[in-house]
Image (cartoon, grey):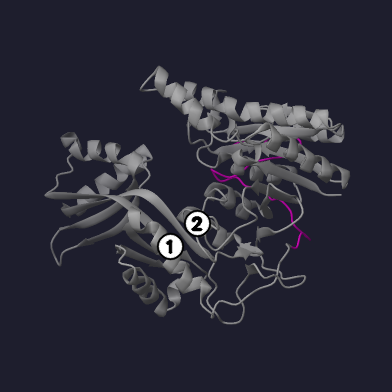
Amino acid sequence: MALIVQKYGGTSVATPEKIIEAARQIRAAREDGHEVVVVVSAMGGATDELLRLASAVTGNPDARELDAVLCTGEAASAGLVALALNHQGVASRSFSGADAGIRTDHRHGRATIVQVDPRRLREDLRKGTVPVVAGFQGESVLTGARTTLGRGGSDTTGVALAAALGADHCEIVTDVAGVYTADPRKVVGARRHSALLYEEMAELAVSGAKVLASDSVDYARTHGVDLKVRSNLTAVGPETWVGDSRRVRGPSSEDSWTPAGDICPIAGVAGRSGLVRCVLRRITSDHVLRLLSELVERETEVELRRYGNLGTEDTGDIALTLPEESVQEMRELLADTDRGIRLDEAHWTSNLARLSVVGLGIGRRPYAPLRLLEALRSVGAARTDLHVTSNKLSVLTGQSDLAEATQIVHDTFVSEPEAPLVHPAAPDHTGSTWQLATKRGQLGVAVPALAAAE
């Protein structure tokens, strides 16, 4: 008998019919002899509606009260799933994040889990009850206020509980049948992975693949939690395992693949739209440090793409990429003369997207950047700020070019004959244990009492 944490996303609980199906799948896992802890997101569209209501009340909502409003979306899902389970004869009880023992820092809207006390969940499991936990939320260890974890927070909740409970694995139940080399709803020829390494999944998540939140992958990698990504249509069928190995077992599959031999392994192609490029010219090194320090202090989401001076001069150019929602804050910072960041030129380019190719060691293949740029040129897609790391190539392109660019790049790196077919894989759970972590941003759990957060 295994202990499993199942996380159901917004599309998996979007309607009463889907909630009833989720409850049926949970009941089936129980009938197979497993203990199950469930984590749920808000019903599809509910969070956006709550944000719309908040903005209709005030143009500048208080962060604490906005979190209090947003937490109700997941709480409603948890109650509804518990009702469906009880109706199907499975004893169940809903929990808020705080009820489930999830403690966070005090940052509203982007809180980090610092402690988990799973004792109440364990007590219900011992009684044969299925706990249904509202994802995306917790309770501040400093103020006791409700907090939200930011984008993809329900994934993080699921992985954090799996780590704290010592679960055999965490299932991420979503509207696709695993992790693909690209979004199968948008890219022709996208192939499902049977297994991925944590490092590959983390790069894909950061690059814009939406199947798993990047924070949740970081938690899973830190604490050795095996992840299983599967469709909400059926609990038995195609899936992708994410872990620390690519163990290959079972018969071959026509729609899943993994690298073999000495061929560069391609995890996938992902994109993120809604980006803006800011180039600051002839800025002194002192001003660069001051600017970056301000951005860090404000926790502004920004990516440094290029920085360098001109010969022996003390001035240089810096290129930054940031999401559209951070542009106003960046402009205000640059316009604040009290900061002493004087600029000769500032150039803004909007409607951009970042396209990334992820694969272990791809940046060490001399041909890879060339093939990427040639593919983009073949369809007339804009291309700038090529960035090469060991496991990823990324380039900025026009937002309107992203769909066509993603398809041609996927064709170039995945669909050509040199990409081999593979076999399905399953994780090796032997010896999988959860280790205590004390660094900020990681879980801290002691049994039976809480470990103090740093």
Above or below for 365 versus 426: below
Residue name at image x 40 percent, y 79 percent: 367
Counting residues from the start of the chain, the first of labels 1 and 2 encountered is: 2
Q: Are marks 1 and 2 in contact (CB under 8 Å)?
A: yes
Q: Is residue 278 left or right of residue 46?
A: left
The residue lying toward the viewer, choosing from 76 and 145, is 76
> How far across and how far down the image is residue 72, in percent?
58, 25
Magenta residue span = 428-454
Above or below for 225 versus 119: below
Above or below for 412 versus 46: below
Which residue does the numbered mark 1 point to in the structure image? 406
> How far across and how far down the image is residue 334, in percent?
21, 40
Which residue does the numbered mark 2 point to in the structure image? 186
Residue name at image x 48 percent, y 24 percent: 66
Report how far apart the C-alphas of labels 1 and 2 lie in the structure. Answer: 9 Å
Dot 1: what SS?
helix
Residue name at image x 47 percent, y 59 percent: 270
Helix, strand or loop: magenta stretch: loop
- Answer whether residue 449 is visible to the viewer in this image: no
Dividing the image into 4 quarters, which one contains the C terminus? top right
Q: Amino acid at mark 2?
A: Lys
